[in-house]
Image (spheres, helix red, strand yellow):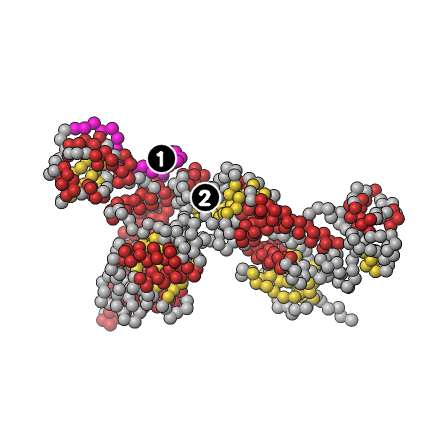
Amino acid sequence: MIAKHVPIRSLKKSDFANLANYITDQQSKIERVGYIAFNNCESVNLDMAISEILAVQQMNTRTQNDKTYHLIVSFRHGENPSNEVLEDIELNICKTLGFEEHQRVSAVHYDTDNTHMHIAINKIHPEKLTIHEPFKAYKKLSDTCRDLEIKHSLEVDNHMTHQLSSSAKASDMEHHSGIESLVGWIKRICFEDMKAATNWEELHKVMEFNGLTLQKKGNGLVIGSIDSGVYIKASTLDRKFTKSTLESTLGAFEPPEGEVLQTRGYKKEPKKLKVDTTELYKRFLTEQQNNHLIKNKGINSLKDNKKFDIEMLKRSNKLKRFIISKSDNYLMRQVLYKQASLSMKANLKKINDNYKVETSAIYQKNGKLTWADWLKKQAEQGDLEALTALRSRKDSALKGNTFTGAGIGKITPIQANNVVTKGGRVTYQTSGIAGVKDDGQRLKIARDITAQGVISALRLAQKQYGNVITLDGTDEFKALVVKAAVVGRVAVSFSDPALEQQKFNLQMEIQNDSIKQRLGLNSSSNGPTGRRFADSNSYRSGDGADGPRSQRKSNPRSLRGVPPASRHNRLRHLSTLDVASIVKPSAVLLSSHARDNMDKQESRGTADSLRWGVFEPRLMPAQMAAADKYLLERMDKKAKGMDIAEHKPMVSATKATYIGMRNVDGQSLMLFQTVDSAIAVLPVIGVTKQFKVGEQVSVNDKGEVSRQRKMKR
């Protein structure tokens, strides 16, 4: 865990409202914002809390410093602390910095490679109205993070850097842009040779050999690249390259003499990756150059239009004032002059506002991008080559509740609305697999994924890694995936033998329950009327002398005669033909009354088998997902032995009894009791009337529900 203060470069850009809105904005992403909290505010609404904080800041009119303190707390890859842990971390860090009583807004983001928390703090005390600026905050943050890692069993991180500030900034920019910095290039190519120099002549030769120059500037030394024209302070490389340190070992500074043949030099190019990005980088440079020309052309055109509009506005205002001056009424002239002035200012503001909006749109569309940002943009547009280059920047794989396999991971085509990080991790936003992360090696389940989402993620894992899947994560996650494989009928096997056995047991349990339900049997072998149904070890009435049924075979010809040709080669000739029951003295239930496909496994009401019949084209994916979730929840409780009626989706127009409404994930579901005593579930398609529980209703094929008409006698 690393906590870092983000200072504002310009006081004019400091705006608590913009910062709070940015960190709490979902930005149309499923996995961006998680935990949100605001502290020490009287308001219970976020917008009102922001307004309250701004009011407190405005009450301090003396300070000229920035009134907002922005902190970022970043966690190690794979760490996703609970909301309770995040709340404790936020409180302890703010208390250490002296902001315990200050107003603040916190939000956790999950849209990057590392989970991180933003904390926007009002530096103005809400009661004293004094400003607080922490002293040596980096040391306090380092100690606090170390203590919190131990307290919450988090991975230990390096909180104190041993680099100089300028060197650390160069490293951060290199990581952000993807372009190798001059500092990084020198350390990779010739840093050791430079340190080994014993005099100024040797040092200059080493540097000139690598296309570098060492010059005296002010009270220090600077290193420049001959080819690129980039200059850095010599002390940025290492503390040993400060002017005082070099002169203490090499003597007084001596400028270079003579010429040395240059063999190589620094160029602004991408960092070396595992894949060849030469052609991609050429495309990047070409596109950036074209965007620069388009941007300049558009900006110049807007400037000309703005200049023309202002000139025409001035001429119009001058003409108005000339006409007003011809009036003999002094008071009328003053009123008209005032109106003309206000109109002039309003129109001028409108012109400037339109110019800002249009220029902002041009910069956003054709603005300059870094190499890493360009790769990210191309990957989000479906460029698989750019996605491969991004993934080669990261060595660490996803951690937590993940899928993987022995097969080579296939790259799934990226849809337009999916989100890609600079590490090449894709967060799918499409229906069904929304919230699943993919880094090319593993798939990770989102925090709040639905049951249908688990099934879809499992199918995606099967498509990418083959039929043998390896699961990593908690026992609850593994049990959920095994159940999804059985309920969703996904033909995969698991590398863990224990999970494979668990899947087999669940399949047998579902299959046995399905058979019992079709034959009208239950676990206690007692029917709804209290009669005992026969099983393979029970006696029939009058069979006591002949022994149990398991020792006899029934003769189909003696029961029903010779079956027709259409009934040949059916389930009748199997040993299960012996299953029969006395329902009434005049009625016998035989196995011939069972379904023809009785020997096949059938999932009842599962997410894969739910079919909405005539209503499916009219239902939104969110409605079907909510109904599937409710049906699966009912099935789970029924499987655990709870006295719950069978629930199923409504697939056709019918007449039924209305029994109530349910709300799942913001979707309204109507429940009906059908003639077979089952509960039919139908998502509300449109605005419906109010019905009473127990009322007889009709549902047409358009999903419209109406009361049944009473026949007049």
**Residue 309's spot in the image, x, y percent?**
30, 53
Residue 596, compared with residue 642, is above or below; it is: above
The three-letter amino acid code for the residue at tag 2 is Asp
**Residue 700's spot in the image, x, y percent?**
67, 59
Residue nearest the observer in this picture, 359 or 78: 78
Q: Is residue 432 left or right of residue 539?
A: left
**What residue sits 75% from the left and 49% below the top?**
595
The three-letter amino acid code for the residue at tag 1 is Lys
- Look at the numbered discs 2 and 1 and tell me whether their residues touch, using CB distance below 8 Å: no
**What residue sits 52% from the left and 39% below the top?**
406
Residue nearest the observer in this picture, 498 or 386: 498
Disc 1 on helix, strand or loop? helix
The chief SS type of the magenta part is: loop
Q: Which residue is mark 1?
A: 282
Of callouts 2 and 1, the N-terminal one: 1
Label 1 neighbourhood size at 10 Å, few (<14), some (14-19), many (20+)? Answer: few
The answer to whether any part of residue 531 appears in the image is yes
Q: Which residue is mark 2?
A: 439
* Residue 558: in magenta span: no
Q: Which residues are magenta?
A: 259-287
